[in-house]
Image: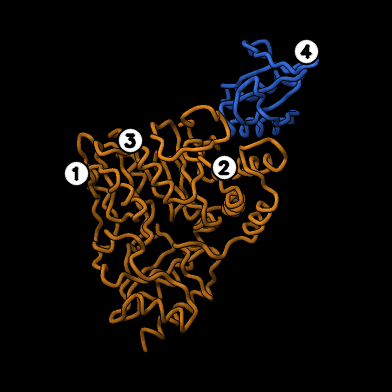
Amino acid sequence: MIYFDNGATTLLKPPEVAEAVQYAIENFGNAGRSFYDAVMLANREIYRTRIELARLAGLDDPLQVAFTSSATESLNLVISGLIGPEDAVITTLAEHNSVLRPLYLTGCDLEFLDCDENGRIMVESFESKLKDNTKFLVCTHGSNVTGNITDVESLYQKCSAHGITMILDGSQTFGAIPVNMSMADIICFTGHKALYGPQGTGGVLAVGSYDFSIVKTGGAGTNSFDRFQSTDLPDIFETGTLNSHGLYGLQKGVQFVNSLGVETIHAKERKLHDMFYEEVCKMDRVRIYGDFSTSDRLPIVSLNLEGMAASELARRLWEENRIATRAGSHCAPLLHQHLNTVKGGMVRFSFSYFNTEEEIAQGIEALHAIAGG
Amino acid sequence: MEYILAFENTNLVMKAERVLFEADLHIKAVPLPDQISTGCGICLQISPVEIGRALKILANNHITEVGIYLRQESNGEIVYSKVEDSADFL
């Protein structure tokens, strides 16, 4: 198999990740629930995972990292914990449903930053979306559809100038490109994509204190006779038994990223991306989506072949060449509406550090064969 | 005679343990005694020789909300008494 669906999950991971998960399953007690060796082993490794993530994000305090099961859970907890129907919120047309649906659920007054014809978020329209009660901006750092990277530094400056809390969806970016707290107040991330961790891991990075309402509650291992659990970070998001097995695996994934360096990983992925794009864009029947005028991109190339449904192209890539891609709407409905791809969607090729130039060449050859046949 | 360091939650215990381990202090994670707080939880035990240095290290790492208790045996029972003023150790 040639795996080009890393935007969905990185299937190939450093071997230490799976080894760590197995070790944790065989050796970890329930973190935070007692004091004996197996529990303290879990406690310590979870804390080391926080340290690795804090290092990657440039955070001073590892306790500014809270764990959840996914970026989707992180976004749900943060959005429903902070935003209410009385708030005006700015978001964008490029968002995933993990942002859009939690926002819809709050009943807040939503404004959308538009995108240009290449799906680039038009940061310059920010001021025109402001209202007196605008309190939050929620936006993606990098599009899972187009691979476009949002100018979050500009947006964060604008938010700070207007006293607006900026919540960033770093699902596609944390581990893939530099991500730090100069880009937003709160960053939601997943563990199983560019951090090479197991599925079922994710979290929230936050500096400062926020008035989160309690969305989920239960056992926390301490203060058992209190009616309500702590609202401090990270405790407020870590109710119940943590996925310590997965988090130990995530620690090894993040160590891999930290040891290589995000820049090194990104440079290799960009080389593969460029190699693929430069050949594919010459093909007659191919329509590519996204802003390729900049080198500041995620390793994603989404396209359609004229006269062929995206689902059929993905099927032929798989059945004839064992190339795994993702066809459809990628859970980003507004961007597909904007790009006129609601009917049929598009086929996404997303690359990782573990792909090779040989695989890219085979992908190009396969597309050539299908487009010409 | 030992001292017990109690924290607001387990995450802070782990942060404290980490910075104290890194400073080569001899600490032990033990169950949070009922006499200090009901329910479950863990805390750190440390010797009188090292508690002063430990408190300075915790303060340097912005861990200031620390409950300090003296653990000693009295008439065959373990008794915990709260230390109200940590300045004695600093």
First in residue order: circle 2 vs circle 3: 2
State the SS at label 2.
helix
First in residue order: circle 1 vs circle 2: 2
Please name the amino acid that badge 2 sits on. Answer: Arg
| 4 and 3 marks on the same chain | no
| 1 and 3 marks on the same chain | yes
- Residue A368 lies, in percent from the top left, at 40, 83
First in residue order: circle 1 vs circle 3: 1
The mark lying in front, picked from 4 and 3, is: 4
| Residue located 30% across and 47% down the image | A105
- Residue A353 lies, in percent from the top left, at 54, 63
Residue of label 3: A160
In which quadrant will I find the C terminus of chain A?
bottom left
Residue of label 1: A128
Residue of label 4: B74
Chain letter of the residue carrying label 3: A
| Residue located 47% across and 53% down the image | A177
| Residue located 25% across and 37% down the image | A87
Residue of label 2: A50
Q: Which chain is orange?
A: A
| Residue sitting nearer the eye, A263 or B50 | B50
State the SS at label 1.
helix
* Chain B palette colour: blue
